[in-house]
Image (cartoon, helix red, strand yellow):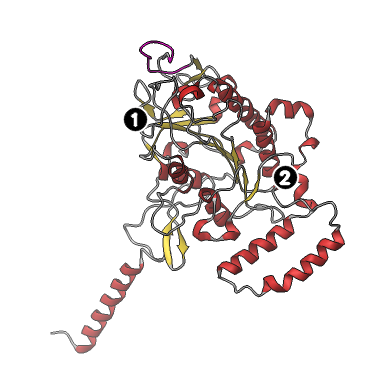
Amino acid sequence: MRTSSALQHTRRSFLRRTAALAAAPLFPHVTSAAEPAPLPLGKAEHCIFIWLGGGMSQIDTFDPKRRGNPKASPRIAGSDYAAIDTAVPGAQFTEHLPKLARLAERMTVLRSVHHHVVDEHAFATNLVHTGRMISGSTLYPAIGSVVAQQRGAIDPSVPAYMLMGLPNPSRGPGFLGARHGYVYLLDTESGPSGFARPEWVNLDRAARRQALLKPLLEQAPAGTMAGEYEQAQREALRLAGPGFMRHFKLAEEPSALREQYGGEFGQRCLLARRLVQAGVRFIEVSHNLNFINGTGWDTHNEGQINQHTLIRDLDTAVSALLVDLEEKKLLDRTLVVIATEFGRPAEFDGRGGRGHQGTAFSMVLAGGGLRHRGVYGVTDELAKQIVENPVSIPDFHATIHVALGIDPRRSLMDGSRPIPITEEGRPIAALFA
């Protein structure tokens, strides 16, 4: 028969074990046999996230199939262009990507990305940027804001996250707050919006204005929305000086190099390289909707006719970026991503363009110290269904995070509520083996 002391000891031991098991999911320092093994985190320090708004056609770019014909009667489903070999045996791109084809050993085309949001561009754009569907009143942060919050800027004199393109909530910090948002610019000539000091406001006058503003900003309570805004405002005032703005002087670059990058989109890519050198952690570069072919990547109807000019523009700019990064010993430290909201079907519509498709489409990863393989994932004969190695949007996000040294299983805090960085996203192990 057990003594009272022995029973109390047994009861205390039971309570301690129960408490430890209950705490294990909440506190990372409490381990259990069921806890997942550590991820092999990558060593990339920067990410250049190239956004092709509208829905890049995978069958006309990085996943070519048999030739189709939009002018035949009836129309024949398939790629609109011929396929060419790349530097990776067995991997082909379409004929309008010859420069990137020669760099395929430094890239991995994820041909098996998929989701089910194809009817609305805004919802799909939000999903690809945040890794989640819009849900209730929760505003989830974009991947750029998550990276900014987790790792910050490499150099404190620059922001952690910059956006070249139109500001949009899908690119924003969500519940992380304004201090993890982006600094944006609309064109490479003017620099970030609102940062250039008007010529008629000299340094002394600007200093007096800041002195008048300071007491008001300091009244904002920490941890509130007003406090978050105060921090963002203070950061904006700091960045408005000449030290930060000098990074936008593309005229300092050799003219021959600027010509290699091509037009406005290419100049944005060149500026992204300069911002990497300056210490910016995450840079999104938008290839705007109306560049080059009139419709951008949303190639319904007549948008298909001049799609090849848009693809060539992408080929020129991104190939120049990869070569430039490599020559400056930055490619292994910089993950370059090409992303879009969904793909497009092999069939042509009534006027020769293409609709939307989410069952299978392509994203691209380059550099970043990954073990590149040219392509990953296999689709069927018309790039409509996935045959091997499907990649979900959470998997896509998890792979980027791991490449940047971030554990995608960590939780972010929405007030008192923990939210994992990805919804069970799994990084592509083959790229880290």
Residue 282 x/y as whole percent: 60, 47
Rendered residue at 29%/72% (across/down): 17
| Precedes in sequence: disc 2 or disc 1 | 2
Task: Verify CB contact (< 8 Å) between mark 2 and mark 1.
Answer: no
Rendered residue at 53%/23% (across/down): 307
Q: How many marks?
A: 2
Residue 386, label in figure: 1
- Any magenta on residue 87? no
Q: Residues within 10 Å of mark 2 (few under 14, many from 20)?
A: some
Residue 145 x/y as whole percent: 55, 53
Residue 330, label in figure: none
**Amino acid type, residue under disc 2 in the picture:** Gly
Start and end of the magenta stretch? 70-80
Rendered residue at 33%/29% (across/down): 385
Q: Main secondary structure of the magenta part?
A: loop
**Amino acid type, residue under disc 1 in the picture:** Ile
Q: Which residue is mark 2?
A: 191
